[in-house]
Image (cartoon, rainbow, N blue to C red):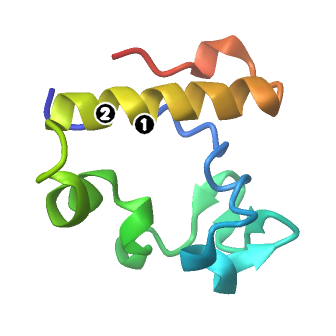
């Protein structure tokens, strides 16, 4: 797998409360750069929001990329369930 199959549901962007790294973007738990369910700073978004770069720079010495994607998909799907997002947006690895 070359990249995580993001379904652009916005769940991760709508759940940033408590993430210190993203605190400057936090507006009541939702990223203030999320506009019409799209990232308005996509090309310059923070490292944490760039799955592949995050893996390469922070997690590659701890796990395989496949495991990292699996854990991200699990977290994504759990957020979607918590936010009652339609099941059609679930990420499948």
Q: Position of residue 29 (x, y in %)?
A: 81, 63
Q: Quadrant of the C terminus?
A: top left
Q: Position of residue 31 (x, y in %)?
A: 70, 68
Residue that label 1 marks: 72
Q: Nearer the viewer, residue 35 or 47?
A: 47
The residue sitting at 68% across, 34% down in the picture is: 79
Question: Where is residue 80, by image quadrant?
Answer: top right
Query: Helix or strand or loop: what does disc 1 sit on?
Result: helix
Q: Position of residue 47 (x, y in %)?
A: 36, 71
Q: Residues within 10 Å of mark 1 (few under 14, many from 20)?
A: some
The residue sitting at 34% across, 26% down in the picture is: 70
Q: Position of residue 19 (x, y in %)?
A: 63, 67
| Extreme residue toward the front, this view | 62
The residue sitting at 14% across, 34% down in the picture is: 2
Please say if 65 is above or below 73. Answer: below
Q: Is residue 47 visible?
A: yes
Give me the disc on residue 2.
Answer: none
The residue sitting at 61% across, 48% down in the picture is: 12
Q: Residues within 10 Å of mark 2 (few under 14, many from 20)?
A: many
Query: Helix or strand or loop: what does disc 2 sit on?
Result: helix
Please say if 83 is above or below 43. Answer: above
Residue that label 2 marks: 69
Please say if 43 is above or below 86. Answer: below
Q: Are marks 2 and 1 in contact (CB under 8 Å)?
A: yes
- Left/right of residue 35 with respect to residue 5 in the rendered view: right
Q: Quadrant of the N terminus?
A: top left
């Amino acid at each position: 797998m070359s990249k995580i199959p993001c379904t652009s549901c916005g769940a991760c962007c709508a759940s940033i409360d408590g993430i210190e790294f993203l605190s400057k973007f936090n507006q009541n738990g939702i990223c203030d750069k999320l506009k019409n369910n799209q990232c308005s700073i996509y090309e310059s978004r923070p490292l944490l929001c760039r799955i592949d770069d995050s893996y390469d720079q922070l997690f590659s010495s701890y796990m395989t990329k496949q495991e990292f994607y699996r854990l991200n998909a699990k977290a994504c799907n759990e957020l979607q369930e918590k936010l009652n997002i339609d099941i059609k947006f679930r990420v499948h690895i």
